[in-house]
Image (spheres, helix red, strand yellow):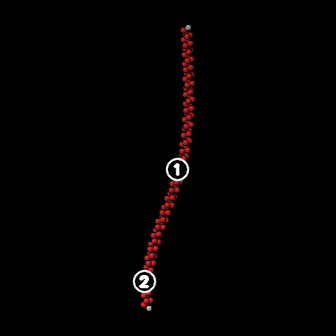
């Protein structure tokens, strides 16, 4: 009888151990499911981040393209400003030349005016002498 009880005790122990192992397996399965879900969420987050990175890279490339275009426009504007500056300098030089010519013409006019006055005075004296 003692041996039957021992045998029964052994069976109960084995059953308990089997039940305990099943319970542990179920817990592990649940943990695995939770971990799988976490992995899926992380994969989705990673995919979204990758998409955001691609979009940002696309925006950066577009911005770089616009910057290069603006840089070219600035260079062209600088070139045009340089040309206009040279034209202004040339115009200033021509204005100074014309100003000098005007001054010279004014001097010649004053000189001719003085000669005319002298000639008129001489003519008047000659006419007075004739009378």
Disc 1 element: helix
Give the residue at x 44% y 82%.
Answer: 117
Quadrant in which the C terminus appears:
bottom left
Quote the CA–CA distance across marks 2 and 1.
Answer: 80 Å
What residue is disc 2 on?
Answer: 118
Mark in the foreground, 2 or 1:
2
31 w.r.t. 72: above or below? above
Q: Is residue 85 above or below residue 1?
A: below
Residue 64 circle label? 1
Q: Is residue 53 above or below residue 9?
A: below
* Image x and y of residue 74, in percent: 51, 56
The residue drawn where x is 48% and y is 63% is 85
The spot of residue 66 in percent (x, y) is 53, 51
In this rendering, position of residue 55 left or right of residue 101 = right
Q: At 43% across and 85% down in the image, what residue appears?
A: 121
Name which of mark 2 and mark 1 comes first in the sequence. 1
Q: Quadrant of residue 4?
A: top right
Q: x and y percent of residue 2 in the render?
A: 54, 9
The number of numbered badges drawn on the structure is 2
Callout 2 secondary element = helix
Query: Outermost residue toward the bottom?
Result: 131
Q: Quadrant of the N terminus?
A: top right
């Amino acid at each position: 009888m003692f041996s039957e009880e021992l045998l029964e005790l052994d069976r109960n122990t084995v059953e308990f151990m089997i039940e305990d192992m099943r319970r542990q397996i179920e817990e592990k399965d649940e943990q695995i499911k939770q971990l799988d879900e976490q992995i899926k969420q992380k994969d989705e987050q990673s995919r979204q981040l990758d998409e955001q990175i691609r979009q940002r890279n696309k925006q950066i490339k577009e911005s770089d393209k616009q910057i290069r275009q603006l840089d070219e426009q600035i260079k062209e504007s600088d070139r045009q400003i340089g040309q206009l500056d040279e034209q202004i300098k040339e115009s200033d030089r021509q204005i100074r030349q014309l100003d000098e010519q005007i001054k010279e013409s004014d001097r010649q006019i004053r000189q001719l005016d003085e000669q005319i006055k002298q000639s008129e005075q001489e003519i008047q004296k000659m006419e007075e002498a004739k009378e």
